[in-house]
Image: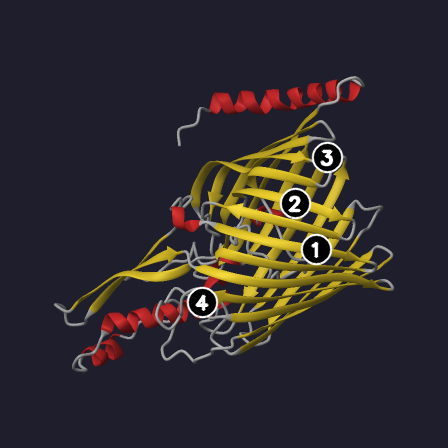
Amino acid sequence: MNINPLKIAALLILLPVMAKSQNELSSGSSEESNKKILYGFVRGGFYSSIDKSDDKLYVPSAFSDFALKLDASDGVRFKGFADLRFRYGTEFSKPVTRFDLREAYVTVNGKTWDISAGQKIVKWGRADFTNPTQKLSPQNLISRSTDHEDMDMGNLLMEARWYPSPVISVEAVAIPYYRSSVLLIEPLSLPSYININQIESLVTDKKMFTYGIKADFHIKGVDLGLSWYDGYDPMPGIALTDFSIDTTGFIPFPTATLSMTPYKIRNIGFDFETTLGSFGIRGEAAWTLPSLSYKVYEYIPCEEIKWVAGVDWMKGNWRITGEYSGKFIPDFEASAVDPIIGTDIDPIALAGLLSIPGFDFEGYIRMQVGAFNRLYNYQLEKVYHSAGLRAETDLFYGKLTPSITTLYNFTSRDFMLMPELTWKPADGLTVCAGGEFLSGMKGSVYDIVDEFMNCFKFGLKVNF
């Protein structure tokens, strides 16, 4: 992308002035019913880690972000919202220069309904760490940002809400195109014999239509939700799309091309939220049924049933959140091979397999790809159990907020620790420092990605 730096500099100088003038105009006119508010932020920071090869500190990711947001409405009949981001820097040692229209949508309000259309982030579910009912919006799981919500990505969609009574609301969402999540493995250094084709933009095939319907019930003391999702999972699978093997050398050498591939599912969900004294209690459950079988297509996950139960507690300045989640694979069959990523190729074993008359080596690699999909989706075991805990507090009248978040999967032994310290020394200024530490058993997901995901991070942010 060719971007004129002079134009960007002029934009950065003029927009805060425009925002201030616009806000003064909106607040100063009592006769003007339409309100237009322009605001945003400027942010800079870096991610650093220790290179295992020489035990030295280096900076694989550094960022300079500019965000401009527009919130326009008449307060009654309509609302327009846009969130435009520009980033310049590096991510995982690769240069990055990009614009991103994170959200841009219009909402029209009626007496008992509202309709939205455009690029929007829609999130279902009530749990804190795991949301089995959430399938509407993709996520960037390798987001390099000091704001965790930046992982959420918008979808082009139409959303309708109906409020027939104070105790019932119904929501319907239609998504005509497919936008893929960014998987945790995207920056992974792959073996020389493996290539991965990513989904770089929207998939606009007419078959990619997705819809979801959700009903919420607001009963005294408890909120309940029932949801139905029919369409493509934002988390794609990995398919073997090309394979060859060179047997001219002393040692046979395979070459495999893997492609991120969407797959269709149906997801039936339930969620609830209530209080018990000083405790907030929430939970979710979902039954996910792929339209195709993982036994035939290597990129398809297994059918699964997931559940989550969480509790949060506040005492003074302290906030504690705990959560347990589980997963059950009804039609479970143990994988007969090791995953293609996360294990080293054994030339001797490879030669032995090729010596077997009629051995289907491509079929064997396809099974290995399927095994990796099951590893990534945590479906190598019949039952999984995991838990999460977050503790945070406010100090010095809310200016200093230390927090720590930890997640542990008791079945796969994947472990994540995220300490963070947020300081607000002045109005509009935020300083953030922290880190992310992942670890796991050899060959587990976190063991594969810990080399590029483990980090120390620091950021400065000014809101305007």
Q: Which of marks 3 and 4 is nearer the N terminus?
A: 4
* Residue at the spot of label 3: 428
Q: How far apart are marks 3 and 1 (CA)?
A: 36 Å
Q: What element carries label 2?
A: strand
Task: Give, as a three-letter code, the residue at label 2.
Answer: Arg
Q: Earlier in the sequence, mark 2 or mark 4?
A: 2
Task: Give, as a three-letter code, the residue at label 1.
Answer: Asp
Q: Nearer the viewer, residue 378 or 188?
A: 378
Mark closer to the observer (3, 4):
4
Q: Is residue 194 above or below residue 14?
A: below
Q: What element carries label 3?
A: loop
Question: Is the C-beta separation of discs 3 and 1 under 8 Å?
Answer: no
* Residue at the spot of label 1: 216
* Residue at the spot of label 2: 161
* Residue at the spot of label 4: 301
Q: Give the quadrant of residue 104.
A: top right
Q: Is residue 398 left or right of residue 84?
A: right
Q: Earlier in the sequence, mark 2 or mark 3?
A: 2
Give the residue displayed 49% in from the left and 21% down from the top.
7
Q: How far apart are marks 4 and 1 (CA)?
A: 29 Å
The reply to whether residue 329 is in sight is yes
Coloring scheme used = secondary structure
Q: Nearer the viewer, residue 302 or 176?
A: 176
